[in-house]
Image: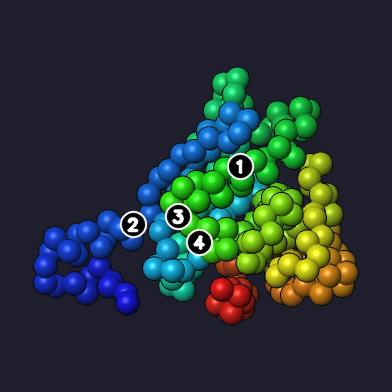
Amino acid sequence: MSFPCAAVKLLPWLAAALCAAQAPAPVQFKTRDGWTIAGIYQTPRLGKPVAILIHGVGSSKNEWERIAPQLWSLGLGTLAIDLRGHEKSASGPRGPVHFREFDAGGEWPRATGDIEAALAFLKRRKIPASRIGLIGASIGANLASQAAQSQKELPWIILLSPGQDYRGVPAARLEGRRVLLAASRPDYYAFQTCARLASQNGFAFLEARQGHGAQMLDDPDFLRKFLDWIAEAR
């Protein structure tokens, strides 16, 4: 049963408590290799899944701020994270590090640890892996695919504009898993990667008119199909 904040006219204390429970909140947690990861967490409705949202290079958790309310309309919670070296996740085991330094040090593949830490954060809040989906954009899609390989209980994974290999992070095949691939035809590298993965594994493939990664969600028609797939998958 849903209780929209504005609809609760009686019992103001109850309305305040419900609104506080529904409001997204900033969170932090540690990775195994010592990074402090920042995120925004929106609790799900009772018994509903949580989507971990993973952005692309040079972006941040704010990439998802227009999409999280759409997911909440389906009852899903969200955990949007800043990947290591981005925005408020700049503190590494040896102090502040910027993502522009990652290529030289081979840091990008280790960013799968940020997703593993997000999964551990949700587990501590009694959200099992069987109620968690991954949504990644660009290199975030590749990282999500890599993290999902060892997390067999995840019910679904969405890869927005994955590439065969981004900065040393290949796209995992994820045979036998429930996966939605998405890319726009003008985004040739991502589109060809999706076409190959879809043909090899029988994954659903959603074509966008234009855009890369989370940009594709600006298209209302694409967004509707994206949300419909999630509603069916959960």
Q: Earlier in the sequence, mark 2 or mark 3?
A: 2
Q: Quadrant of the N terminus?
A: bottom left
User: Which image quadrant for residue 206?
Assistant: bottom right
Q: Nearer the viewer, residue 86 or 187?
A: 86
Is residue 106 rendered to the left or right of residue 217? right
Q: How many marks?
A: 4
Residue type at mark 3?
A: Lys
Report which residue position mark 2 lands on: 23
Residue type at mark 4?
A: Val
Please name which of the two marks, 3 or 1, marks the residue nearer to the observer: 3
Q: CA distance from mark 2 to mark 4?
A: 15 Å
Report which residue position mark 4 lands on: 50
Q: Is residue 188 visible?
A: no
Q: CA distance from mark 3 to mark 4?
A: 11 Å
Q: Which mark is residue 114?
A: 1
Identify the secondary structure beneath mark 2: loop
Is residue 177 rendered to the left or right of residue 25? right
The residue carrying pointer 3 sits among few (fewer than 14), some (14 to 19) or many (20 or more) residues within 10 Å by Cα, namely few
Report which residue position mark 3 lands on: 126
Q: Nearer the viewer, residue 210 or 164?
A: 164
Q: Is residue 138 above or below residue 95?
A: below
Q: Earlier in the sequence, mark 2 or mark 1?
A: 2
Q: CA distance from mark 3 to mark 1?
A: 19 Å
In the rendered image, residue 11, in percent from the top left (x then y), is placed at 11, 67
